[in-house]
Image (cartoon, rainbow, N blue to C red):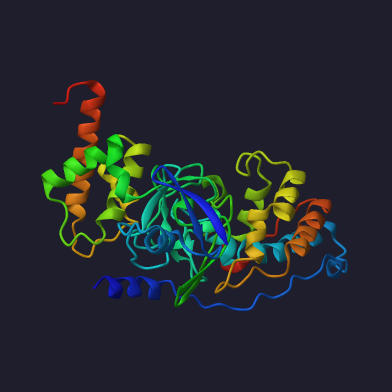
């Protein structure tokens, strides 16, 4: 069945079954492979994308549920202020180990910061609990979110570099 | 390693699914001549739905939803806000779709969904309460969302999120009976004075 979906600012025409998860539409049809498969049941967070700015698990979101929503994937997260702050923090703290889960971690972290610009440790733990990292980089992820929040706050108040 | 971890999580979700039984029809309560006793008996029968895991899991004792027929904690861990949604950045619909969605991953046959998927507010927590306590809570406008008994009936008999309990998706046992039969029990309970049952000795 043909669908017109908005991915990273461009309309893409895809011809897939209605129950095809967005993960496979993005990876196999659109060719955006930054979004990863982990569990297939929305429990590990590796496949996190944004649908109208909100985090969604792509492995479990049927293409027929998306409609005309704006979809953002890891490939264009850097186009947002939050994405830039997270990239900078991630690099400075060397957050990544193997990296497989990190696109999902970053998309969840971005959704968190968009909704809560100054999250506490508890706020971060509650939201990021849905993203698993087998390398155990949780401590650095949390530190990276705090640092990104600081960069964002500095840029908002004009005290940044 | 990732796969093994995920399989452990999935195994923890395993549920013992049992077949839903029917609810007793309202007509079978007519033999109870005392109106108050009949009313309490009608609520006790309706409470088989209210106390079913499909309902209790989203009426938890705290702000953490539970899962399965054994009411184990929701995985991944979630703590809902006062309005019944996940924390900022992780709303329920991050994972829960607008309808039950089948999976291809054994043993989780489907992930539940509804357009208004959310947790009940704190004042409507049911886990750990006796049938009498749930009954009193359901009637109390201070705890039931300022609903009249008429509105309570409307909510329980017609709300499609309540109705999810009878359409819970593959791998989950439905609540007893039907929403229609449940609504009839609630209507008859209200019509007979909305009396609450006494605590059973085991409840005290």
Report the residue that reaches farthest toward the top: A158
B187 vs B26: above or below: above
Q: Position of residue B144 (x, y in %)?
A: 63, 44
Q: Quadrant of residue A97?
A: bottom left
Quadrant (top left, top right, bottom left, bottom right) of the N terminus of chain B:
bottom left
Q: Nearer the viewer, residue B14 or A148?
A: A148
Residue A39 position, x and y percent, is 36, 68
Please state if B161 lies on the left or on the right of B28 as rendered: left
Q: Answer with the quarter of the image where residue A145 lies.
A: top left
The quarter of the rendered structure image containing the C terminus of chain B is bottom right
Q: Nearer the viewer, residue A71 or B138?
A: A71
Decide if residue B150 is in sight here: yes
Q: Is residue A62 visible from the viewing direction of this image?
A: no
Q: Is residue B68 above or below residue A126?
A: below
Number of numbered markers: 0
The residue lying toward the viewer, choosing from A15 and B48, is A15
x and y, in percent, of residue B203 in the image: 57, 64
**Picture coordinates of residue A96, whole percent (x, y):** 17, 55
- Relative placement, left or right, of A77 versus B49 is left
Which residue lies at the image location 66% right of the left edge and 49% below the top edge?
Answer: B138
Q: Residue at x 20, y 33 (%)?
A: A151
**Is B125 left, or right, of A47 in this rendering?**
right
Say whether residue A161 is left or right of residue A153. left
Height in image: B17 above or below B83?
A: below
Query: In the image, what residue occupies the spot 68% across and 70% down?
Result: B176
């Amino acid at each position: 069945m043909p669908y017109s979906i908005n991915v990273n600012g461009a309309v893409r025409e895809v011809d897939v079954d209605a129950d095809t998860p967005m993960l496979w539409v993005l990876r196999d049809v659109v060719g955006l492979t930054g979004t990863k498969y982990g569990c297939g049941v929305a429990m590990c967070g590796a496949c996190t994308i944004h649908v109208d700015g909100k985090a969604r698990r792509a492995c479990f979101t049927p293409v027929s549920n998306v409609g005309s929503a704006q979809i953002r994937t890891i490939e264009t997260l850097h186009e947002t202020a939050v994405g830039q702050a997270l990239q900078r923090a991630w690099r400075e703290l060397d957050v990544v180990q193997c990296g497989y889960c990190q696109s999902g971690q970053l998309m969840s972290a971005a959704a968190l910061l968009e909704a809560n610009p100054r999250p506490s440790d508890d706020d971060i733990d509650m939201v990021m609990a849905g993203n698993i990292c087998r390398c155990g980089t949780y401590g650095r992820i949390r530190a990276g979110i705090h640092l990104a929040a600081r960069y964002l706050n500095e840029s908002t108040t004009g005290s940044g570099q | 390693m990732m796969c093994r971890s995920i399989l452990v999580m999935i195994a923890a979700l395993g549920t013992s699914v049992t077949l839903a039984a029917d609810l007793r029809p309202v007509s079978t309560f007519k033999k109870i001549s005392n109106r108050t006793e009949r009313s309490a008996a009608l609520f006790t029968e309706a409470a088989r739905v209210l106390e079913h895991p499909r309902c209790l899991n989203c009426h938890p004792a705290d702000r953490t939803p539970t899962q399965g027929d054994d009411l184990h904690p929701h995985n991944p861990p979630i703590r809902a806000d006062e309005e019944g949604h996940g924390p900022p950045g992780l709303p329920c619909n991050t994972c829960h779709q607008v309808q039950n969605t089948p999976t291809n991953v054994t043993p989780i046959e489907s992930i539940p969904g509804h357009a208004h998927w959310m947790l009940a507010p704190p004042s409507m927590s049911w886990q750990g309460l006796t049938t009498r306590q749930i009954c009193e809570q359901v009637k109390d406008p201070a705890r039931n969302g300022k609903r009249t008994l008429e509105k309570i009936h409307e909510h329980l008999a017609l709300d499609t999120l309540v109705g999810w309990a009878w359409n819970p998706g593959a791998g989950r046992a439905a609540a007893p009976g039907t929403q229609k039969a449940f609504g009839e029990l609630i209507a008859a309970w209200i019509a007979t004075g909305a009396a609450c049952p006494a605590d059973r000795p085991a409840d005290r």
